């Protein structure tokens, strides 16, 4: 039996193809759900897992501050591993709740299969969490050869490292006609409406998470979001905007309130939603004029869709990326507007059309 641990809408969207393939192969799998999946304010995205045809074997609450959520995950998964003894627990990436899962597995003697180790994201504490999980893991699936080299440099045996590409690209048809995402996917009505909204006019997709290891002590997620919204406002004369909510690395309440106010102010041109789900996000991004923010999806998956990305701030600093990804500081509105103009330029559109992506 293999346990797949998932804590957020983002990691389930990436892990879903693996779960399906293991299931199709006849493997016994259990989906263990925790953290943001179980938080109503963040969309209660466990419903997405159930809609995908998987009944979670266990739901382990993990909420509050990152320290509280990590501790709850450690306790809950410690109890789970006491009665369930999987051959492996699959952990993706670098989330703080996954540090709790990994620690529980290590102490219970459950081998960890770690996906996406060796990556760099200097503006978030995720970077060190990812490395810690790598040191606890027994088998490794880095996304690129560069990531594999970093793992080996950390002292991890080469025969346990298997470069696999980005799992988030698995199951995505990268042709201009995407049967997986263009067919009826039984989207929730709100998601279906937003996808239609994106397809009806040039639209930007925005997702901005907190920098949890900022270099500027005055940095706040709300301040960075305010800067980006100010920078993008002039573009609303010609473009629409879809905003997905930030994750729970820090309390997003005030930032979500700001997003809701902005959406109400430009209700004919802006939509906001807690989550589009992975399929909905890919379909919306593929139809968009560009993706802005600091989600890893803008660097890892969006380039293979032929769409340009504006990566903002320091959260993803150091992460390997293709030529269709450009960067801007989060704190300077003038710089953001200059970068947005470049994002929408014919030159970057032509570069994005080549779909050059080191993660594919």
Image: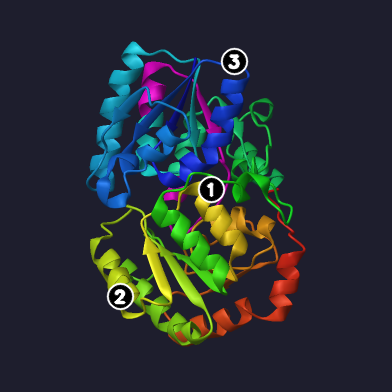
Residue 356 in the figure: left or right of residue 143 = right
Residue 98 in the figure: left or right of residue 168 = left
Rendered residue at 56%/40% (across/down): 117
Q: Nearer the viewer, residue 113 or 234?
A: 234
Residue 76 in the figure: left or right of residue 272 = left
- Give the Cα separation between the discs numbered 2 and 1: 26 Å
Identify the secondary structure beneath mark 1: helix
Q: Are marks 1 and 3 in contact (CB under 8 Å)?
A: no
Which of the two discs, 1 and 3, labels the residue nearer the N terminus?
A: 3
What number is the disc on residue 264? 2
Residue 115 versus residue 86 in the image, above or below: below
Can you give x and y, in whole percent of width and height, for residue 122 in the image?
A: 49, 58
Q: Badge 3, how many Cα within 10 Å: few under 14, some, many 20+?
A: few
- Give residue 355's quadrant in the image: bottom right
Q: Badge 1, how many Cα within 10 Å: few under 14, some, many 20+?
A: some
Query: Is 290 inside the magenta-drawn segment?
Result: no
What number is the disc on residue 279? 1
Residue receiving disc 3: 26
Residue at the far right in the pictured view:
354
Q: Which residues are magenta?
A: 103-128
Q: Are marks 3 and 2 in contact (CB under 8 Å)?
A: no
Rendered residue at 50%/81% (across/down): 336
Q: Nearer the viewer, residue 43 or 142?
A: 43
Identify the secondary structure beneath mark 3: loop
Which of the two discs, 2 and 1, labels the residue nearer the N terminus?
A: 2
Identify the secondary structure beneath mark 2: helix
- Give residue 115's quadrant in the image: top right
Rendered residue at 30%/38% (across/down): 70
């Amino acid at each position: 039996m293999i346990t797949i641990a998932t804590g957020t809408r983002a990691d389930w969207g990436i892990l879903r193809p693996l779960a399906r393939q293991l299931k199709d192969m006849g493997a016994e799998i259990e989906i263990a759900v925790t953290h943001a999946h179980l938080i109503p304010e963040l969309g209660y995205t466990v419903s997405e897992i159930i809609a995908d045809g998987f009944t979670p074997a266990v739901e382990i609450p993990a909420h509050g501050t990152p320290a509280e959520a990590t501790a709850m995950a450690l306790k809950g998964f410690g109890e789970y591993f006491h009665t369930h003894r999987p051959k492996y627990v699959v952990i993706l990436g670098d989330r703080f709740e996954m540090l709790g899962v990994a620690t529980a597995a290590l102490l219970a003697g459950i081998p960890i299969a770690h996906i996406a180790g060796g990556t760099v994201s200097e503006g978030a504490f995720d970077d060190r969490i990812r490395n810690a999980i790598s040191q606890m893991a027994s088998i490794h699936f880095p996304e690129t050869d560069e990531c594999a080299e970093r793992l080996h440099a950390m002292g991890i045996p080469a025969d346990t490292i298997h470069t696999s590409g980005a799992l988030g690209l698995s199951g995505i048809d990268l042709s201009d006609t995407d049967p997986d995402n263009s067919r009826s996917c039984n989207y929730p009505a709100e998601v279906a409406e937003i996808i239609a909204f994106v397809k009806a006019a040039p639209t930007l997709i925005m997702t901005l998470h907190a920098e949890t290891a900022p270099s500027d002590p005055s940095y706040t997620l709300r301040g960075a979001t305010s800067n980006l919204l100010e920078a993008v406002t002039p573009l609303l004369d010609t473009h629409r905007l879809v905003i997905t909510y930030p994750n729970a690395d820090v309390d997003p309440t005030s930032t979500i309130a700001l997003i809701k106010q902005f959406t109400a102010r430009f209700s004919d041109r802006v939509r906001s939603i807690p989550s589009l789900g992975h399929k909905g996000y890919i379909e919306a991004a593929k139809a968009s004029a560009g993706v802005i923010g600091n989600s890893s999806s803008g660097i890892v998956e969006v380039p293979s869709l032929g769409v340009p990305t504006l990566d903002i701030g320091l959260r993803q600093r150091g992460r390997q990326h293709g030529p269709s990804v450009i960067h801007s500081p989060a704190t300077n509105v003038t710089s953001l507007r200059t970068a947005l103009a470049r994002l929408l330029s014919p030159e970057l559109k032509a570069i994005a059309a080549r779909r050059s992506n080191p993660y594919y």
